[in-house]
Amino acid sequence: MNTNSPQKNSTPVRKKILCVMSDVGGAHRSAAEAMGEALQREYSHDSFSFEIVDLYQVAGGFCNFSVKSYPFLVNHYTGVYNRFFEFADHRLTWDFFYKVFIYPFMIGKIVPFIEQIKPDVILSTYALCNRLVLDAVEELNLADRVFKVMLVLDLFDVHRSWAEPRADLTIVPTAEAKKKIVQCGVPPSKVKQWGFPVKPRFQDDIQPQRVRERLGLKGDCFTTLIMGGGEGVDYTYQIVKGLVEGNLNTQLIVIAGRNARLRSELQELQQRTDTRMVVFGYTDKVHELMSVSDVVITKPGPTTLMEAMTKELPVIITGTPARQELHNIDYVRDKRIGYALKKGEAFVPLLQKLIGSPNEIERLKGNIRREKIPSCTNEVARLIMTGGEV
């Protein structure tokens, strides 16, 4: 991604930054885009180049198919995925899985790819890219020339595949994440607890009234945002249908993500109801939609949770979580920044309570201000542009 921002903190040498990830869910690309946005805002366009690459797409074949099955597994076979997560979260089983099912299928494509790009910095936002790129730069004898940064996106339940002692630095969002990374063999001096990569736009001032007018929303009506990640989840329809049938005094903003069928069903429902509702597919305007909302109903993914906290937006968590997201639910409950409902549990009574209790909304926002995890994008941008000097 090339940039066109005005000159700010310029550096004398143009940095070639390669950000590796995979499009499994939305968090990994979102984190990569957050770093690109931070670099655009802080540095001149001629001081760096920033390229986001789906490393598994580069390799193609078996491994790409396997990791891209993640959304389907989590949504439909959560128990199977969770058991596999735990099985592979041990040194011996992770080594076996990597050496048998990842390395031999991918390294032959990744080594020439890295050799062609010749990056100065490699930033990884996906755990299953970490070991691959480190092996590749070692095979190319570039380990001393390339600055290697791992950006951990799991908040609490960190899989050991994130932990790579050969990386120059690993950035983690919480003390729990740091503890796990160190336990897996990364020297404490190479681990920094700086926060989570939230796009800088979420900290921009937004004029809510203008956004409401553009969307055709009332300015004085309680607004509920419902979203299920970049890929969308089918049970979003049942949530929206339940809220519509509950005749609540709320207007709805619904994000269906890339789920075209879900978006079509929601639009049909929109035509049949008097409830004021706006339906989106995949959108890059989440920061605006959160700015005009009073509460968000979402699955317990780390990116949406951190974005909502940046906007001081109370959350209602729903859905069956992936293994790495289990403690995200505990975090919401324990810190009292929102609520967590089981899949199928009624939303109408809880939302009715919140609509009639502005003091409760303010209490939740106060808890968010006290407990929220900071964004690390600016710190990481400075880190990769200075080669480790912060």
Image (cartoon, rainbow, N blue to C red):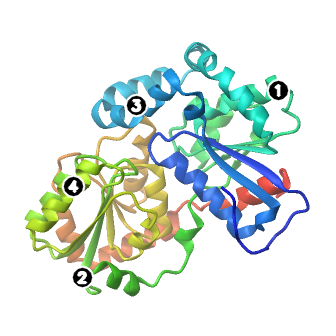
Q: Which residue is mark 3?
A: 69
Q: Amino acid at mark 2?
A: Cys
342 w.r.t. 256: above or below: above
Q: What residue lies at 80% left-to-right and 56% top-to-bottom?
A: 385
Whichever of callouts 4 and 1 sits on the residue coming sooner in the sequence is: 1
- Give the secondary structure at mark 2: loop
Residue 155 visible within the image: no
Within 10 Å of the Cα at label 1, are there few (<14), some (14-19), or many (20+) other Cα atoms? few
Q: Left or right: 18 with respect to 138?
A: left
Residue 250: give x, y in percent of width and height: 20, 74
Q: Position of residue 33 (x, y in %)?
A: 58, 56
Q: Amino acid at mark 1?
A: Leu
Q: Are marks 4 and 2 in contact (CB under 8 Å)?
A: no
- For the residues labelled 4 and 3, the Cα–Cα distance comes to 23 Å
| In this view, 273 is above or below 359 | above
Question: Seen in the image, is 353 located left or right of residue 385?
Answer: left
> Which element is circle 4 on?
helix
Within 10 Å of disc 3 (Cα), the crowding (few <14, some 14-19, many 20+) is few
Q: Secondary structure at mark 3?
A: loop
Mark 4 lies on residue: 264
Quarter of the picture holding the C terminus: bottom right
Question: Helix, strand, or loop for circle 1?
Answer: loop
In this picture, residue 236 sits left or right of residue 149: left
Lower sequence index among marks 1 and 3: 3
Mark 4 or 2, nearer chain start: 2
Which callout, 4 or 2, points to the residue nearer the camera? 4
